[in-house]
Image (cartoon, grey):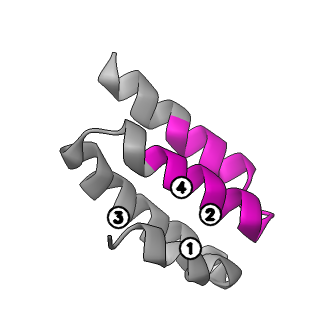
Amino acid sequence: MARAMYDYTKAVLAKVSFDVNLFCKELKKAMTRLLPYEIEELKIWVDSLIKQNPQLNQCLIYLNP
């Protein structure tokens, strides 16, 4: 079940990656809902997404509390 939340989070983040504010909001929400090891996996995935969309770089502050 927890894996489903991780996959759902990735799907949502990918869909809102066009808008920096929405992306940051969803990323912040994800940090409260995912398990610690899923957060580590999400950090890697977000890093690769940011390489494709550099404007999302400002949302990295939510990954490093």
Q: Are marks 2 and 1 in contact (CB under 8 Å)?
A: yes
The residue under label 1 is which amino acid type? Cys
Q: Residues within 10 Å of mark 1 (few under 14, many from 20)?
A: some
Q: Residues within 10 Å of mark 2 (few under 14, many from 20)?
A: many
Q: Which residue is mark 4?
A: 27
Q: CA distance from mark 2 to mark 1?
A: 5 Å
Identify the element where label 3 is drawn: helix
The residue shown at (62%, 63%) is 24
Q: Residues within 10 Å of mark 4 (few under 14, many from 20)?
A: many
Viewer-proximal residue among 2 and 64:
64
Residue 59 badge: 1
The residue shown at (21%, 47%) is 36
What is the magenta range? Answer: 9-30
Q: Is 22 left or right of 3, judged from the image as shown?
A: right
Residue 24 badge: 2
Q: CA distance from mark 4 to mark 2?
A: 5 Å
Q: Are marks 4 and 2 in contact (CB under 8 Å)?
A: yes
Q: Are marks 1 and 4 in contact (CB under 8 Å)?
A: yes
Residue 50 badge: none
Q: Earlier in the sequence, mark 3 or mark 2?
A: 2
Q: Earlier in the sequence, mark 1 or mark 4?
A: 4
Q: Is 41 left or right of 50, judged from the image as shown?
A: left
Tell me residue 22's x, y (percent): 73, 57
Viewer-proximal residue among 35 and 12:
35
Q: Which residue is mark 3?
A: 44
